[in-house]
Amino acid sequence: MSGTIRTALGSLVVAAVVLGLKFLAYRMTGSLALYSDALESIINVAAASAALVALRIAARPADANHPYGHTKAEYFSAVAEGVLIVLAAFTILREAIPALQDPPARLAPLPGLLVSVGASVLNGVWAAFLLRAGRAARSPALLADGRHLLSDVVTSLGVLAGILLARATGWHVLDPLLAALVALNILWSGWHLVRDSVGGLMDVADLATTQRLREIMSLHADGALEMHDLRTRQAGQVTFVEFHLVVPGDMTVTEAHLICDRLEDAIQAEIGGANVTIHVEPQEKAKHHGVLVL
């Protein structure tokens, strides 16, 4: 079992524990705001399950039907998470809007709030771990899960602060108002998740990666004349890199191949998991743009 799959399995366990704690906090308090917070935790469990399935699919090697591998499966889990977030937000709004007109009179007891605090602390610790693991593994699924959990923590802290303020002031309308604000925040988070994941599926270019590649080429392409038509795309943990390498017309195939090997090694050292394709051309094919080596 790979490290990313173990991490995804850990996310599922943590999400289930946090879900139980948050629904316990809601049952102890009857707070609509805590109910909205608990509903978002259902999304966390569903998202963790989707990420686990997607990572298992993404780990499959390339085959005849999928010559570029299965790594884009990770983006589908992030899109599914975004859709679930939007559905949860509308569910919360359906409960919160009527309560704004008739706020509940019951104040949330402190023991229930402490349970919610414990769930938020657990979420915060795991979110930080997920973001670190996702960056190290370059995994869109883990990063999406980590960012969503971090958003969940911020939301939970806001809810708790608002409930404490309601207890201190007696403004019971703060409870459904906070639930509505949680729903709007969840909608915003879901939109960003869907947008980023669809961008990955549509092969949106990463300008920072392109600039790094240009710098690598200028440093490690001694003997070549020019590199042009650089294209990159991200598929899960794999970055596909394609470009044309212009060499002197009298250079041997062996010499050109050595330059290509040097460039591939440099790119893979800088971008782990890079899949590099280089098209070698003679000097009359130079376009005099892109990366000029000489």
Image (cartoon, rainbow, N blue to C red):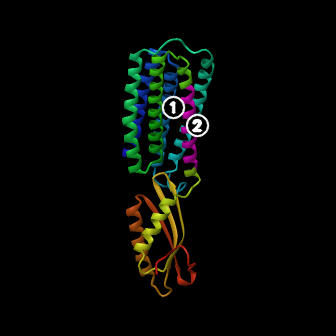
The residue sitting at the front extreme is 169
Q: Tag 1: residue type? A: Ile
- Please provide percent x and percent y for residue 127: 40, 38
Is residue 177 or residue 197 the one in the foreground? 177
Query: Looking at the image, can residue 256 be seen?
Result: yes
Q: Give the Cα distance between marks 2 and 1.
A: 10 Å
Which structural element holds mark 2?
helix
Is residue 181 or residue 93 the one in the foreground? 181
- The residue carrying pointer 2 sits among few (fewer than 14), some (14 to 19) or many (20 or more) residues within 10 Å by Cα, namely some
The correct choice, above or below, for 37 with respect to 168 in the image is: below
Q: Tag 2: residue type? A: Val
The correct choice, above or below, for 194 with respect to 227 in the image is: above
- Left or right, residue 205 beside residue 150: right
The residue shown at (49%, 85%) is 248
Which secondary structure dominates the residues rendered in magenta? Answer: helix
The residue shown at (47%, 19%) is 26
- Please provide percent x and percent y for residue 104: 55, 13
The magenta segment is: 179-198
- Please provide percent x and percent y for residue 166: 49, 19
Locate the N terminus by quadrant.
top left
Q: Which residue is mark 1?
A: 43
Q: Which residue is mark 2?
A: 83
Which structural element holds mark 1?
helix
The residue shown at (44%, 21%) is 164
The residue shown at (51%, 29%) is 40
User: Quadrant of the rendered structure where residue 98 is?
Assistant: top right
